[in-house]
Image (cartoon, rainbow, N blue to C red):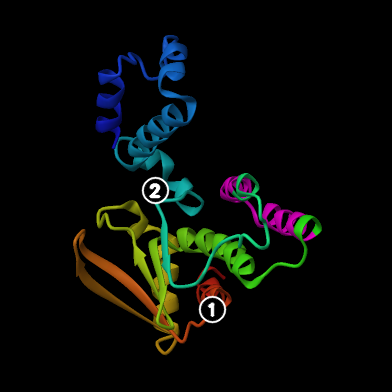
Amino acid sequence: GFNIAMKDLEIRGAGDLLGGEQSGFINEIGFDTYQKILNEAIEELKENEFRDLYKDDDKTRSFVKDFTIDTSFELLFPDDYVNNISERLNLYTRLNELKTETELEEFRAHLIDRFGELPIQVEDLLDSVKLKWKAIEIGFEKVILKKNKLIGYFISDQQSRFYQTERFTKVLQFVQRHPNACKMKEKQTRKGLRLLLTFERISSIKDALSAIEPILA
């Protein structure tokens, strides 16, 4: 949160968060780490002290800070498709940096042009990126894809503004309109009580996408 981020900055000798002494501090911890701390501080301000000023942002902002997919599907670049280790690592890095579906399609075209038709593992890997984007937009912090099920875990912080947004209202309306397609329930976990959304008969990444995309329609 903001207080933790500010304390972290103080401990590291940062001084004023936005002041003129930041260049040395940024060089010391690295720009990515600095940017992460700064973004966390800003998000904390939006959530609390200045929440009324940022109500309009609720329609577009992401409330999910970290996202994970736990799946039994193989999501990777096989070594018989891209046999150079450095090349594979570079591709994973580039894939992780993509932000839009247009960029994803351009990346797909690059792979086909460079390495040939995509094996199923790569198709699933690319689709999993799209699944991640959709899941985060819905409000999932975690998705489990196993045993022909998709289980989406909503934001663990029950005080999050996400639960007062139109986006979450759309989720509730979707669940009410499609009682046979999905089930919503609460479950006790190590992180406390979590709200889950479960879809049955999910046998592929494409099935998972088809299941959750209508929520955002």
Q: Position of residue 26 (x, y in %)?
A: 45, 19
Q: Is residue 191 left or right of residue 133?
A: left
Instruction: Return the mark for residue 65.
Output: 2
In the image, residue 60 lies at what x, y percent? 51, 51
Asked whether the residues under the numbered discs 1 and 2 touch, taking CB atoms below 8 Å apart as contact, a structural biologist would say: no
- In this view, the residue farthest toward the right is 113
CA–CA distance between discs 1 and 2?
A: 26 Å
Whole-percent x and y of residue 92?
58, 50
Dot 1: few (<14), some (14–19), or many (≥20) neighbours within 10 Å? Answer: some
Sequence-first disc among 1 and 2: 2
**Left or right for 112, reference 178:** right
Q: Which secondary structure, mark 1?
A: loop
Q: Quadrant of the C terminus?
A: bottom right
Q: Quadrant of the N terminus?
A: top left
What segment is highlighted magenta in the picture?
A: 89-112
Front one among 92 and 202: 92
Horizontal side of residue 69 vs 204, given as left or right? left
Q: Main secondary structure of the magenta part?
A: helix
Specify the label residue 204 is tagged with: 1
Question: What type is the residue that disc 2 sits on?
Answer: Lys
Q: Is residue 10 above or below residue 33?
A: above
Classify 209 as above or below 87: below
Residue 91 magenta-drawn? yes
Residue shown at 42% from the left, 46% from the top: 55
Position of 21 with respect to 114 (left or right) is left
User: Which numbered disc, 1 or 2, marks the residue closer to the eye?
Assistant: 1
The quadrant in which residue 17 appears is top left
State yes or no: residue 61 in magenta: no
